[in-house]
Amino acid sequence: MRSTQSKSETNLAAFAERTRHRATCRLIPYLMFTYLLAYLDRANLAVAKLQMQTDLKLNDAVIGLGAGIFFIGYFLLEVPGSLIVEHWSARRWLARIMISWGLIAALTGLIGTPLFGSLSLKLQFYLARFLLGAAEAGFFPGVIVYLSHWFCFEDRARAQAYFMMTQPLAIILGVPLSRWILETVHWAGLAGWRWVFILEGAPCVVLGFATLFYLTDHPEEANWLSREEKNWLLARLQAEAQARAATRRVRWVEAFRTPRVLLLIAIYLLIVSGNQALVFFFPSITNAMKSMSVFWRTVAAILPYICSMGGILLNGLSAHRMQEQKWHTALPMLCSGCALALAILSGTHVALALLFFCLAGAASQAYLPAFWTLPTAFFGKSAAAAAIGLINSFGNLGGFLGPYVFGYLRTATGRFSPGLWFLVACTLSAGLLAATLRLPPSLKVNNQNENP
């Protein structure tokens, strides 16, 4: 009897793992590719500006402000976008986002042409960045909400780790690609920096239309799953929703005034301030290392992000295995701040500075998978969607604050170190705040008691 029961449990565990694997293989690679293009179109300014500043006569303060203005547009539609994904259709909303951001990203390459009329070059640049942010708004939180439709709490950190590896991957692939376009593509008499925006923006439009046919909104609509697999997924998701509702039902409007959400906003605002400024200005930092060739400066610009991919994956899998989120959020932030401080103190020792920048890179985004499971741990579906949008919306204002302050300090002092110390302060503060989080017990579903 015991042997039969053990065999049944083994078969059920194998079935459960197969179902998870099918959902992961179907959804995660496609979402990673779409996010790669989104992040590339957001961050390629870091490379394009190496020519763009000379052509348009824009200083670092203007570039920093423009990089930050992206997040003002981004701010406006985050919460509505998350709720649209929850209550309408992730497939249609994400497709709309991709088509519109692809068009606007490509049009950024036409700044300074008659298309923008008589506006000053600075205003054209600011307008293009604002519209790009408004177009992309809702994509990241929309995907986080979408993953909660397919993966239960204890599986979510792992799924999000795979998805969020795309951020550093976009820079690893995007920096050399953008640099290659910048230096070699001068078609139709247009400068290379213009083609960086055009060639990296246009594919998103095509992918947006493909999304309408490829993604599936909910498990019950998935014709690529068997009936048993659909039922198993739905049963797990419903059990999680009921367990959360049994503790306390929180309406979505309450997410706007909950102290936990305010704390998560503060943490995310600070860490994004540090990370986004480094994304936009690190190519300039490595470009100033004139003791190295252009090739090795390009390699140096992507090394921290190669390390970042490993940090995200390892920390996400560790959070999944240990079912612990607080310290998997706080410790990477604290380690990143310390490593960045050591990079500054390395001074003119280029190899040592790069080593610490790589350590900072390994930790800088490792918090992401654990951090973004927290709203779904605290709230029910609609409230979690609102909280995710709210945190991402206000938190990403750090994407305005960080590049703006860094660019201002760089222009005012002529040195990178004052801006880098500002990033250290932001990152360490985020880690200290994360260490104060008080989390509810992880929501777990006993797989052995569920039948497909």
Image (spheres, helix red, strand yellow):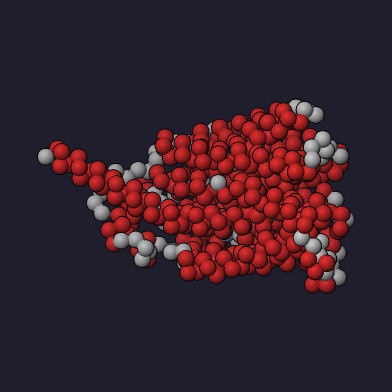
Residue 84 in the image, given as x and y percentages of width and height: 51, 64
Q: How many marks?
A: 0
Residue drawn 86% across and 39% down? 414
Furthest-left residue in view? Answer: 1
Is residue 299 something one can see in this rendering? Answer: yes
Residue 283 in the image, given as x and y percentages of width and height: 75, 44
Q: Quadrant of residue 66 in the image? A: bottom right
Classify 197 as above or below 209.
above
- Which quadrant is the N terminus positioned in? top left
Instruction: State the residue in front, 49 or 75.
Output: 49
Q: Is residue 323 left or right of residue 258?
A: left
Q: Quadrant of residue 347 in the image? A: top right
Residue 262 in the image, given as x and y percentages of width and height: 57, 45
Q: Is residue 412 left or right of residue 329?
A: right
- Which quadrant is the C terminus positioned in? bottom left
Q: Is residue 452 left or right of residue 62?
A: left
Classify 381 as above or below 360.
below
Residue drawn 84% across and 62% down? 121
Residue drawn 61% across and 31% down? 335
Instruction: State the residue in front, 6 or 155.
Output: 6
Residue drawn 86% across and 70% down? 118
